[in-house]
Image (spheres, rainbow, N blue to C red):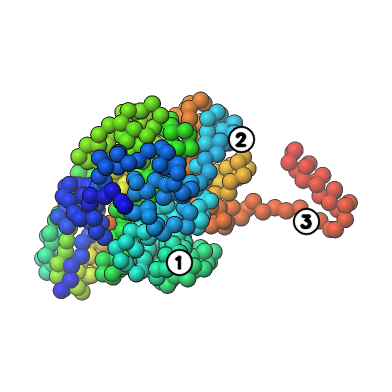
Amino acid sequence: MAFVSGLRCRECSREYPGEALNVCDFCFGPLEVVYDYATISEVVSRDRIAAGPLSIWRYHDLLPASGEDPVDIMAGFTPLLKARNLGERLGLKNLYIKNDSVNPSFSFKDRVVSVAATKAREFGFETIACASTGNLACSVAAHAARAGLRSVVFIPSDLERGKVIGAAVYGPTMVAVEGTYDEVNRLCSEVGDNYPWAFVNINMRPYYAEGSKTLGYEVAEQLGWRIPDHVVIPSASGAMFTKIWKGFNELACLGLLDGVDSMTFGPDQNTVHHPAITTKMHMAQAEGCSPIVNAWTEGQTQVRPVRPDSIAKSLAIGNPADGIYALRVIKESDGSAYAVPEPEVVEGIKLLAETEGIFTETAGGVTVSALKYLAESGAIGADELTVAYITGNGLKTQEAVEGVVDPLFIRPTMGSFEEALEGRAAKVSS
Amino acid sequence: MGRQRVKFTFDGDLVKEPIIYMLGRDFHLVTNIRRADVGDALGWVVLEVDGEKEEIERGLQWVSSTGVRVDPISGDVLQG
């Protein structure tokens, strides 16, 4: 069973039953899940977690859907790799990569969609839906297939073929919308309000977003129930950023971290901050769509929406729903926010691939380039325990790195091969 | 009749314009503000708009044409 008491408005604190709702009827603020932490603290333990499946559902006590029969394509429990080569390049001795690009549909979205799909089935929905330019569409279609649900996926009509195929293969009803970014957004929001579907990031949003907490839990568990000194996280809506922070704080409050005493949750569960959680939260966005970073840099508490124009399309959210909450987390954690210049996004992808053998999509390039900046600027010390989150697979955005293809063309003879090899060696040494 | 929940974001001098009043006067829409934060250089208002569907459509298009940004209250739902 799920230990959920209901939903609560993040702005005015009005309470609602745990249904398929996402907005407060009174102030139109976002609704968040309210947990029964008193009961959770009685049942949850490290042993109980360790005995669970090797997926996000090992943390089912801390998720808003029942872990008894989840819609599970084995999302989560992805590798946490000690990044020795990249660390050496950046002067960081304690660097780890959380490689979430190896999820079943190749992005972290599987975590949030697994929770949303499970909840949708629990509520009796027969259709799950989303509006997406890539990762989310793939994940929704894949989970729907597993759950035996119908899926409807809205995509912009000019979406790259590779991304369309990656979602279409799972058999969703695919709707290609002609129109600008804003028009697609508005239409999908209207559809979400008018159709009896589980729209994962609209009426399922309170539950969906909670899936990202598992990125915090897993890193802590994989580090031996410790938290890092720094994390570097790519951000679009800001939801994942705030949920990783929430995940660390939940573990601390429940007494699951090494050497940390438990603490009661206050009335606002979403802003709880255990004093032992000293991780500095660093946000990474690409310069072509960096509304949250802009607000942070300008010292604003509000986020001014932008029109996205970035190579990092998976981060291209111009009007981030959780932007103001992410700003609060940066401040509370004494973290930072950095907008990566667009040309450096590809540099980041290449740097990670060449040093650690991990091929990430553009969002990962943003993370690695931001990490490089933070290391070079001294914001992260050489010995500090640092985790960089890589949230999507490079096979999804191959066009971004087309320039790396530069083979040696030879005739099928040893002479031709050796000549070409010498030529390349000479070119490299010059 | 129709109803829409929207967020207006006002940048710069637009903060001083009586946009919401004009939406009611010129498009016969009933506006109901639920939450707002208006500063010197940036402001936003979350509101519900009631009226004829066509007038809501025309009215919101007019608001956009003034330079005020009009968004769904849930933020962008088109995700990567």
Q: Position of residue A358 (x, y in %)?
A: 58, 46
Q: Are marks 3 and 2 in contact (CB under 8 Å)?
A: no
Amino acid at dot 1: Ala
Residue drawn at x 42%, y 65% as measured from the top left: A147
Numbered disc in front, either 2 or 1: 1
User: Chain under label 3?
Assistant: A
Asked if both marks, 3 and 2, belong to the same chain, the answer given is yes
Q: Which mark is residue A145?
A: 1
Amino acid at dot 2: Asn
Of the numbered discs 3 and 2, the one sitting upstream in the chain is 2
Q: Position of residue A359 (x, y in %)?
A: 58, 49
Which residue position is annotated with label 3?
Answer: A409
User: Chain under label 2?
Assistant: A
Measure the alpha-carbon separation of dots 3 and 1: 43 Å
Crowding at mark 1 (Cα within 10 Å: few <14, some 14-19, many 20+) = some
Numbered disc in front, either 3 or 2: 2
Residue drawn at x 59%, y 33% as measured from the top left: A84
Q: Is residue A289 visible?
A: no
Measure the alpha-carbon separation of dots 2 and 1: 39 Å
User: Chain under label 1?
Assistant: A
Is A104 displayed left or right of A406 in the figure? left
Secondary structure beneath label 1? helix
Crowding at mark 2 (Cα within 10 Å: few <14, some 14-19, many 20+) = some
